[in-house]
Image: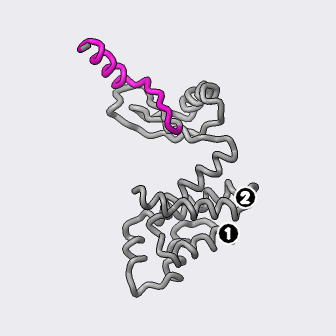
Amino acid sequence: MAELATIARPYAEALFKAVPEAEQSAVVTQVAALAQVAGDAALQSFADNPRVTQEQVFGVLTEAAKVALAPAVSNFLRTVLDNGRLAALPLMAEQFQTLVHARQGVAEARVYSAFPISDAQVAEIVGPLEKRFGRKLEAVVEVDADLIGGVRVVVGDEVLDTSVKARLERMKSALLA
């Protein structure tokens, strides 16, 4: 995994430098759509077929992504395909999004909840967290039934765990100490 991240970094940085700041949010969406398609095993198999040309892979990728590509994104994708780096495209998209968010002063907050939560509940969680972390947060919610109840929030390398599972673990540690 670290090898793909190392491969992906220069591509993400090059795209970041090539796209004007005003267009970066739109490009994040386009590259994310391409990355989602590129992560599909059937597409990977299709792209690895020696009888398939890079132009055919490009066509299938762009059609399946169902987004109009900016010229910079189109050139980026062609470069990725020409260099045989399709497998790293999802990480390139992730790293590009991280660079754009850093420029905008936004961080991703992964909110793990034991149950599905509404947008209003997410807003209630994110508001105080933005004050605590001192930056705007973009919440990505994932359901993790192992938490039993409560939420676990990960922002960068910081973790705020208020789940029932974490509380039970702390009680267990206190009782066994």
Residue 139 position within the rendered picture, expressed as x and y whole percent measured from the top left: 55, 39
Name the residue rendered at 34%, 25% in the picture: 165
Kind of residue sitting beneath label 2 = Glu
* SS for dot 2: helix
Within-10-Å neighbours for mark 1: few <14, some 14–19, many 20+: some
Name the residue rendered at 47%, 57% in the picture: 5
The extreme bottom residue here reads: 51
Give the quarter of the figure containing the C terminus: top left
The residue beneath circle 1 is: 72
Calculate the distance from the C-alpha at mark 1 to the C-alpha at mark 2.
10 Å
* SS for dot 1: helix
Within the magenta stretch, is there residue 146?
A: no
Residue 163 position within the rendered picture, expressed as x and y whole percent measured from the top left: 40, 25
Report the label total.
Answer: 2
Within the magenta stretch, is there residue 169?
A: yes
Give the magenta part as a residue range. 156-176
Q: Seen in the image, is 171 located left or right of residue 46?
A: left
Name the residue rendered at 60%, 25% in the picture: 132
Q: How is the image coloured?
A: one colour
Dot 1 or dot 2: first in sequence order is 2
Kind of residue sitting beneath label 1 = Ala
The residue beneath circle 2 is: 23
